[in-house]
Image (cartoon, grey):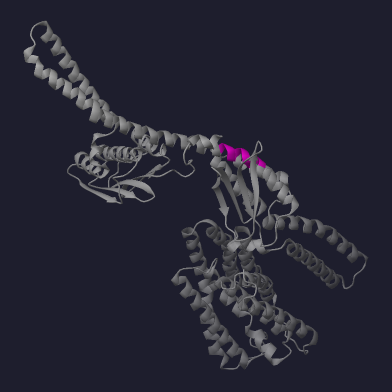
Amino acid sequence: MRRGHPVAFAGTVSAAGLVVLGLAGVLLGPGGRLDPPIALTVSAAVGFVPVGVFLLRHRPRSRTARLTALTGLAALVGLVAVAWSGTTAGAWLVQWSWWPPLAVAPAVLLTFPDGAAGPRARRASRLLVATGAASSAVLAAAAALAPRTLLTDSRVPLPDPCLPLLVAFAALGAVSALALPVALVVLLRRARAREGAVRAQILWLTPAAGLLCVGLVLDALDVPLALTPAVLALPLGIGAAILEHRLDDLDQVVPRGAVRLTLAVAVLAAYAATLLLVERVTGSVGVGSVLVLAVVAVLLDPARRWLQQRVERLLFGRRDDPYEVLTALGRRMATAAAPEEMLRAGAQAIVETLRLPRATVGVDVDGRDLVVADVGRADTDAVTFPLRREGRRVGELTVWTRRRGDGLGPAERDLLAEVARQAAEAAEAHRLTLALRAAREHLVLTREEERLRLRRDFHDGVGPMIAGVRMQLHAARPRVEGREGAVLDDVLADLGDLGRSVREIVDGLRPAALDLGLEAAVRRAAEAVLAGRDVRVEVAGRVDDLPPAVEVAAYRILAEALNNVARHSGATRVDVCLLRSEDLRVSVRDNGSWLDPAARTGVGTTSMRARAEELGGRLDVVGGPEGTHLEAVLPIGRPVGAPAEDPGTLSR
């Protein structure tokens, strides 16, 4: 936020100066003022000026902010012109100053919400602004020829040069009018292409833009005041999108006092308008008028309280209702399936119900906090609440204040401390889940290392020893006859069976193909299983020094995936990739169509997924018209959240 930006300062000073100039015209201006319809200009000024100045003060470089502010300032110029229309210059401005706010409206729609539209939209926005400026200049030139009668007195004939200027204005104005529905269509298409908060902001503005289009049609049909609510709806739609969906976090800079003051001023304005209306209708303020005003006063105060409650809830959340906040938090966490999801749901509920810009939840793992949930974004001050269970710290809840230096109130601190007490149970459950996962991963790694050791012992020790004994007995057999020879034959047969059993054990402990290395084993399996097809194997990074468990899991997953392609796919091309970075990524991509709904939960896919998950990894399978893509991510080093040495330390 940069409140001292020169653009913001210039916009604020210009708005204040125009208001002062308009009041001076009402009080001190010469007589003979024109009486044009000003409802449209008042709507534009009331709607665009506060929203535009607010946006300029907090996002001065935004195109949307600048166009919104310019639209409001142009409307203020029109009102100042009416106040000084007793002068020739003021009367001249009255004839054309109502048009620029309408001409700029399509450009505002094209740049909303963040001013970061595509290049075509930016070019169209600049073209519309230029068209609006040209049409305003043409209308101003025509007004110079008839400054007091061009559009405000149809009884006076216009000078001949005015006719071509008005025709040119009509042509240029038609471009701006036709651009409005086009801008609405572009806005809807952008909403379909965007996601998250930006999409929601555009959808909030869309009804206001549609109402403006309807207003133009009704105005063309001579419906009185058709454009007035439509023009007012556009800036209000921008404001609603900002406040409801946090465009650039601007809702965090609205003080509660300013909201209450604004509502109080609105109530006083409504009361004053009612007083003027009663006086105009009755001609004086008598007993009946006083009764009417009393009824209005009684009705306005409940309306103010109701509106204030809704607006404050929109801006500041439900911090004044701790029971409702805790109920919403409990409801969110109850729907979560796992402790990690419960913590994420709790952080989301805190951000939404208290209108805080950001909340995170960390779980204590071996003396360091592992961030499990991170919702929102902010660069304000952080406030931390420890998560404790049975007097022991299991994590922390961190929230960010709405503005720098603001802090949290006592009621909010008490509420968040209660939330932290509830979240501690989920944090401990997630901590134990991490401990169990780490123990399982440690067990898998240890198991495969032990299998590799046993395989080497059997292959290099027991196997050769049995073979050597059998060879010696076989050499001695010709010298043994009779009953002893028959016994020796039985021993040789048993030793042969024992040797075969040892080989089966060796092959079962670890795939024999891996003796040549993972890359060679994968290439050999691909050539054997997918013979006659276009198979490409790509290896990036070293794969010859992987932990035994990772090497076996990668080979088993790839072998099963290649078998699935061979059995279920009509693929003619298969790409196999092994990529080593911080993790080992193995993928199989084909142009066939073996993946069907049953394949996603079949025995083969389930087995592959289990092999990846027992190492702390994951497996994803995606099928589409262009084929099937399987990818497994296998952690190589110590998985995130696992202890450095003993997996039992987490549960202590």
Q: Residue at 74% across / 57% down in the picture?
A: 307
Q: Quadrant of the N terminus?
A: bottom right
**Toward the viewer: 312 or 545?**
545
Q: Considering depth in this image, is 634 or 201 the residue closer to the camera? A: 634
Q: Locate residue 520: give its quadrant.
A: top left
Label the magenta part by its dominant secondary structure: helix
- The residue positioned 20% from the left and 27% from the top of the image is 464
Q: Nearer the viewer, residue 468 or 500?
A: 468
In the image, taking residue 298 as reference, residue 260 lies left or right, namely left
Q: Is residue 623 visible to the viewer in this orientation of the structure? A: no
Q: Is residue 112 magenta?
A: no
Q: Position of residue 583 (x, y in %)?
A: 38, 47
Residue 456 vertical position relative to residue 534 in the rendered view, above or below: above
Residue 442 picture location, percent across and down: 43, 36
Give the quadrant of the C terminus. Answer: top right
State yes or no: residue 426 in magenta. yes
Identified at 69% across, 75% down, the residue is: 42
Looking at the picture, how far across and down is residue 164, in whole percent?
A: 53, 89
Q: Which residues are magenta?
A: 421-429
Most distant residue in the left direction: 478
Q: Position of residue 550 (x, y in %)?
A: 35, 40
Q: Which quarter of the picture shows residue 518?
A: top left
Q: Is residue 92 in view?
A: yes
